[in-house]
Image: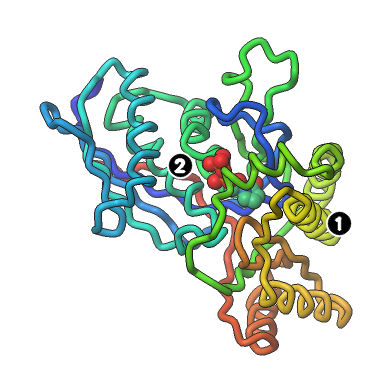
Amino acid sequence: MTDASTAVATAHPNIALVKYWGKQDEELVLPLADSLSMTLDVFPTTTCVTRCPGAPADTVTMDGRPASQEAARRVVRFLDLVRQRSACDDRASVATRNTVPVGAGLASSASGFAALALAAAAAYGLGLDPAGLSRLARRGSGSAARSVFGGFALWHAPGPHAPDPDAACYAEPLAGVRVDAALVVVLLDTGPKSVSSREAMRRTVATSPLFPAWLAATRLDLRHMRAALEAGDLATAGEIAEHNALGMHATLESADPPVRYLTEQSHRVLEQVRALRTAGAGCWATMDAGPNVKVLCPGDQATRIAERLTTATGFPAVVARPGPAAALHPGA
Ligand code: 2P0
């Protein structure tokens, strides 16, 4: 235990270019396949954790209001894990501020649990290295394992014979990336989603006849994506990212009952991305557990592509560039 009872951390969302979809272990949040993402420089989450010796319960606020029961339960479960490891049983107060639209497929749980992992580990004196922080963040939400790192990150799935699957399951920065990329985030709908990604993932693995094919394809996509990023080949990386996302959504649509995150509006944006590409622009779409479309493109063309997409569709667009690693605020 350290003396500091308060810690504040900021983390940013990440967007997977090769998606995580499907767990091999629900409790430990172990994915079935590796995934690869870019952490953004927009929509940060800042979280303050204060240990409260003698307090009867944890308190959780989000943007100044008490968190929903479900959100608070997830935070308390996460703090229980931290308490177990620290041998300190203090309850805590957790105050989170999000600038990412919650629940709209913009990975608010990734930035949220990455910030919470850093702040809680510091407040409870866990002394974890970056891989340890990534493993801890993962227990809150799988994709949070990647938001511990800035730039491009690779999250390892434990192999079938890993002696300690938990230890083998962490993200790390992807070395050797030679592309100058940005993601244009087209904001279609900032409302909460109808099916949580956790439930949707479970349902897809259990019922989609396409799931085994998805798993094989995404493993191959990851190898080719790494090679393309290392070769500075953004066009190949973009093609793989778009194909990987469409494959994930096809798998979702074939679950029983189907999960449909993409809307008419998403498809309108997708058509515009294709139209821009036909006109010679380098841009490729990816979509997560919500209707928003993110467009991978060369960094020096991002502003222009954002303007053209907004003009063509009427939806606002935000340019995101590779962002920083999650970090503690010094002296908090
Ligand atoms: C990803 N997504 O790789 C994929 C692609 C959404 C679509 O990870 O159950 O909130 O907490 O581990 O991380 C969103 O799911 O799910 C997600 P849990 P998570 O970014």
Q: Earlier in the sequence, mark 2 or mark 1?
A: 2
Residue 297 seen:
yes
Quadrant location, the N terminus: top left
**SS class, disc 1:** helix
Q: Are marks 2 and 1 in contact (CB under 8 Å)?
A: no
Name above or below for residue 177 compared with residue 73.
Answer: below
Name above or below for residue 243 compared with residue 7.
Answer: below
Mark 2 vs mark 1, foreground winner is 2
Q: Position of residue 201 (x, y in %)?
A: 64, 43
Per the image, the residue denoted by label 2 is 114
Q: Identify residue type, mark 2.
A: Ala
Q: Identify residue type, mark 1.
A: Thr
Q: Residue at x 63, y 42 (%)?
A: 153
Q: Position of residue 81 (x, y in %)?
A: 38, 25
Name above or below for residue 191 compared with residue 41.
Answer: below
Q: Residue at x 63, y 18 (%)?
A: 165
Colouring chosen for the image of the structure: rainbow
**Few, some or many C-alpha atoms within 10 Å of disc 2 (few <14, some 14-19, many ≥20)?**
many
Front residue of 37 and 163: 163
Q: Residue at x 33, y 46 (%)?
A: 69
| Disc 2/disc 1 C-alpha distance (Å) | 30 Å
Per the image, the residue denoted by label 1 is 236
Residue with the most extreme top position: 163
Q: Position of residue 309 (x, y in %)?
A: 68, 81
Residue with the most extreme front position: 257
Q: Is residue 79 left or right of residue 113?
A: left
**Few, some or many C-alpha atoms within 10 Å of disc 1 (few <14, some 14-19, many ≥20)?**
some
Q: Quadrant of residue 269?
A: bottom right
